[in-house]
Amino acid sequence: MEHEAHQELHKNIPIVPMLGYYGLASTRKFFEPEYDGRDIDRLQQAIEKFKRHPRSHMLERSLADLAIHAIDLQKPYFK
């Protein structure tokens, strides 16, 4: 990503909320990058799988929703 586009991205979307320990571990288990242009979608799907796990806590699910939303907002900058 070019420097100017990267600055514009962070100006408009300053953060992607960090998942908790179990959310990160679970997402990593479900996500394997393939570097084919669809990794962002696969990352969101992995976060969604974690969110639907019956033992995920309500706060973890809320963080997952925020992360997915923030990633959606960033997608136009990746193209």
Image: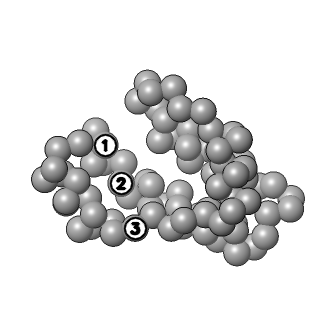
Within 10 Å of disc 1 (Cα), the crowding (few <14, some 14-19, many 20+) is few
Query: Does the residue at mark 2 contact the one at mark 1 (Cβ under 8 Å)?
Result: yes
Residue 59 at least partly seen: yes
Query: Could you say whether the residue bearing mark 2 is in a helix, strand or loop?
Result: helix
Left-right relation of 1 to 40: left
Q: What is the distance, in whole Å, between disc 3 and disc 1 at their CAs?
A: 15 Å
Under mark 1, the amino acid is Phe
Residue name at image x 55 percent, y 43 percent: 43
Which labelled disc corresponds to residue 78?
A: 1
Farthest residue to the bottom: give it. Answer: 59
The disc labelled 3 sits on which kind of residue?
A: Ile
Query: Mark 3 vs mark 1: which is more N-terminal?
Result: 3
From the image, state whether disc 3 or disc 2 is nearer to you. 3
Residue on which the image places disc 2: 74
* SS at badge 1: helix
Mark found first going from the N terminus, 3 or 2: 3
> Which residue is disc 3 drawn over?
15
